Amino acid sequence: MIIVGLTGGIGSGKTTVANMFHKLGVPIYLADLKAKKLMNSSKIIKRKLILLFGKEAYKDGKLNKPFLADKIYNNEELLLKMNAIVHPKVRFHFKNWLKKQSYSYIIKEAAILFENDSYREYDYIITVTASDEDKIQRVIQRDNSSSEKVKAIMNNQWSDEDKVKLSHFVINNINLDKTENQVKIIHQKILKLV
Ligand code: ATP
């Protein structure tokens, strides 16, 4: 089974691109979405996050996303500690998910892949790029976030330039139709590699 990593900066369009591959029949694993789900459903993660951030980490039993986002966006140490709690669980879940897949390749989408060295676990890597201005505008529109917060998160991530150097495929996500064409071309190329 070929494992393809799909990454890119915040707001670059990773999930949008992942869904385009899904439309072509490729199984996709959305690691960041799974992490958020596990933060709500796993009792162990809940307990550890409350120890790390305090009771406010959850509101009415649900993950208090704005509170957590506020805590971690400019605090790398807290972000690393949170990842150390959540990521092992996601990896475990992914391994089990992978066993159930029968297609010739799968795509795992994750925002952090080069930054934590996990890129070595993939057979091929696709990086989605976009201009900083586009990324910021998209996230502000999607999450009602502020330009400062998006920029702070971008500062914790590798630049597109550095990611591209270590990638096998690059999708410059400007226009959705053109992005979909790039997805189809890369899909055919990967099928020839498997
Ligand atoms: P994050 O890192 O925050 O999870 P992401 O890289 O997964 O983000 P998406 O959620 O796919 O990015 O896209 C961010 C927003 O921008 C979404 O609302 C999406 O619909 C929109 N978007 C993605 N690509 C384009 C595009 N080419 N043109 C316009 N809007 C786009």
Image (cartoon, grey):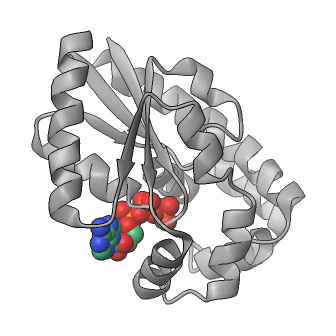
Splitting the image into four quadrants, where does ligand 1 fall? bottom left
Relative to 184, say whether 142 is above or below. below
129 or 107, which lies in front?
A: 129
* Spot occupied by residue 67 in the image (x, y as percentages of width and height): 69, 80
Q: Is residue 125 left or right of residue 148?
A: left
171 or 43, which lies in front?
A: 171
Look at 60% across and 38% down and name the residue there.
113
Q: Is residue 8 left or right of residue 150?
A: left
Q: In what quadrant of the picture does the C terminus appear?
A: top left
The answer to whether residue 64 is visible is no
Look at 43% across and 23% down and name the residue there.
124
* Spot occupied by residue 15 in the image (x, y as percentages of width and height): 35, 55
* Spot occupied by residue 24 in the image (x, y as percentages of width and height): 10, 39
Q: In what quadrant of the picture does the N terminus appear?
A: top left
User: Among all residues in the image, which is located at the extreme right?
Assistant: 77
Q: Is residue 56 left or right of residue 36?
A: right
**How many numbered circles are shown?**
0
183 or 110, which lies in front?
A: 183
User: Among all residues in the image, which is located at the extreme left?
Assistant: 24
Relative to 66, say whether 126 is above or below. above
* Spot occupied by residue 33 in the image (x, y as percentages of width and height): 44, 54
Q: Quadrant of residue 61?
A: bottom right
Relative to 46, say whether 116 is above or below. above
Look at 73% across and 79% down and name the residue there.
70
The answer to whether residue 43 is visible is yes
144 or 93, which lies in front?
A: 144
